[in-house]
Image (cartoon, rainbow, N blue to C red):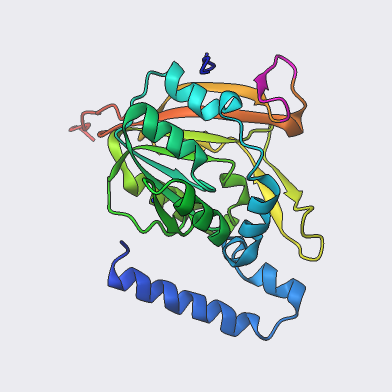
Amino acid sequence: MLKASIVGYPSRTRRASSALATRGIFLFAGRLNSASLVTAMLQDALFSQGEGDAWFQRNHQTYRPEQDPMLHALISQNIHPREVLEIGASDGARLAIIGDRYQAKATAVEPSQEAVAEGRRSFPEIQFFVSTARSLPLPDESYDCVIIHSVFHWIDRRSLLGSIAEIDRVLQPNGHLLIGDFCPYSPKKVRYHHRPDVKIYTYKQDYSAIFLATAGYVLLGQQMIDHASREPSPEICEYDRFSISVLKKLSGGIYAEMQPDVGA
């Protein structure tokens, strides 16, 4: 059971490729009307260009450490990070607690310019980067713990696998990955109600299953909580079913070696 009690550089080539890709998106998008524009670009870009700031303005004062399931998961699984990265870290409030508790070096990746500005003022000990999961400006295998909470369901489906590859790239072998996200019984997509003017969706599914399918991770623990109450419950409405998953990255995977059939 996961519950416990507790009283932020890309290479020159990557930068050039990213710039060319962004330029191409906007050259194409300039020929489209406003609604089609958002459909054509990645949802990641939409959040980088302002929707991330809007989310921060609505939510930044709602964080309650005593109700944070990610902090509970770290404690209950006896994880003691030394280098921790949070993707979608907002202003870094969670990271500040983790850094202080474990004396860990903390890095935040966040698309909201406002959140990062606030975080740099409030938590100067945290290194912040304005970016998204699909383009982490960080070295390979540089963190022993990566946290991604309430982020995957926002990611455009066209950049989902790239984002997963980036997370795997920066996580050290034997490191821990903590995922918090909506987890209905079967995959669902939901129209984003804060922007009725454009056709974008959130995508809800068990994201830990994608990492497990690579045979490079094992699941250490998973708990379903009610998104509204932040508490575990035997009966949770499917649309409020929220998963806290703790995974460990294995250096050699879980492959069983087979002997070749020399007679074949």
Q: Quadrant of residue 114?
A: bottom right
Q: Is residue 211 in view from this perspective?
A: no
Q: 30 above or below 170?
A: below
> Relative to the observer, which residue lies in front, 137 or 59?
59
Seen at 48% across and 47% down, the residue is: 122
Q: 196 above or below 92?
A: below
Residue furthest out toward the left: 262
Q: Does residue 242 show up magenta in the picture?
A: no
Seen at 51% across and 18% down, the residue is: 6
The rendered magenta stretch, by its main secondary structure, is classed as loop
Quick one: quadrant of the C terminus? Answer: top left
Seen at 24% across and 28% down, the residue is: 257
Seen at 46% across and 60% down, the residue is: 130
**For the magenta stretch, what is the residue range?**
228-235
Q: Does residue 230 show up magenta in the picture?
A: yes
> Relative to the observer, which residue lies in front, 119 or 262?
119
